[in-house]
Image: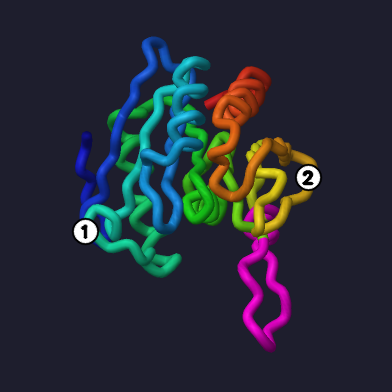
């Protein structure tokens, strides 16, 4: 485990190096869950099997023992500090795939251009937040559309937050289950493996 100082407190990073890495995968967790979520572990296993070194990032609010996530700007700033540290040291000279589960996927999308991501991996992207009475429906599709590199979204067929559309560089893998993605973790891993096999990861 590696502790990384960020503008909003220390973040923890758990490294799983590949023997001969061709790229790195940096994954963040969901709002109330941690890096031990089944779909994160499944995606990490798939990545290591395809010669990617993996870094699982625990945001400062989780390290501090809080369950409620920090504001978006703080999440993005802490994530940026961690990715820049990894790019300079542990994952140096590797193209980086950035991603995460739910909230973590949103952070990866929002920072993908600034951090020069080679690709983005979204597990259970929360496309449509729950509607509030008297408020119009909202969509977070602009966060996905802002990504300029190949993107995989692994989404449960019954996800209450909706199903993102495919796009010019966006693949959507529908797997059994809901937003938790717990129903068929092998399907999650298989979707990630298949995408990584075809992904052109040039630094």
Q: Is residue 113 visible?
A: no
What x and y, as percent, mark residue 141?
69, 59
In terms of secondary structure, where does tag 2 sit?
loop
Tell me if residue 76 comes above or below residue 151 in the rendering: below
* Distance (Cα) linking label 2 and label 1: 38 Å
What residue is disc 1 on? 64
Residue drawn at x 45%, y 52% is 30
Query: What residue sits 29% from the left and 55% below the top?
Result: 62
Which residues fall within the magenta stretch? Answer: 128-145
Residue drawn at x 66%, y 58% as measured from the top left:
160
Front residue of 136/118: it is 136
The x, y position of residue 35, in whole percent, is 37, 42
Question: Considering only vertical position in the picture, is 18 above or below 138?
Answer: above
Q: Which residue is mark 2?
A: 167
Mark 1 Cα shell of 10 Å, populated few (<14), some (14-19), many (≥20)? few
Q: Is residue 36 above or below residue 198?
A: below
Residue that appears at 49% across and 29% down:
42
How many badges with numbers are in the image? 2
Foreground pick, 86 / 108:
108
Q: Quadrant of residue 27?
A: top left
108 with respect to 140 (left or right): left
Instruction: Examine the image and state in which quarter residue 186 appears.
Output: top right
């Amino acid at each position: 485990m590696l502790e990384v100082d960020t503008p909003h407190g220390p973040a923890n990073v758990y490294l799983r190096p590949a023997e001969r890495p061709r790229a790195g995968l940096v994954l963040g967790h969901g709002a109330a869950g941690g890096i031990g979520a089944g779909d994160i572990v499944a995606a990490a296993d798939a990545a290591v099997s395809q010669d990617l070194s993996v870094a699982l990032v625990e945001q400062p609010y989780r390290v501090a023992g809080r369950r409620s996530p920090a504001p978006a700007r703080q999440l993005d700033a802490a994530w940026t500090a961690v990715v820049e540290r990894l790019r300079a040291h542990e994952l140096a000279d590797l193209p980086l795939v950035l991603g995460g589960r739910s909230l973590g996927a949103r952070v990866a999308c929002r920072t993908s251009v600034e951090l020069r991501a080679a690709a983005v991996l979204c597990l259970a992207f929360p496309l449509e937040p729950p509607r509030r009475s008297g408020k119009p429906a909202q969509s977070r599709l602009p966060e996905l559309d802002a990504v300029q590199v190949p993107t995989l979204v692994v989404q449960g067929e019954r996800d209450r937050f909706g199903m993102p559309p495919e796009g010019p560089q966006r693949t959507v893998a529908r797997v059994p289950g809901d937003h938790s993605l717990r129903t068929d973790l092998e399907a999650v891993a298989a979707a990630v493996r298949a995408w990584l096999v075809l992904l052109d990861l040039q630094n």
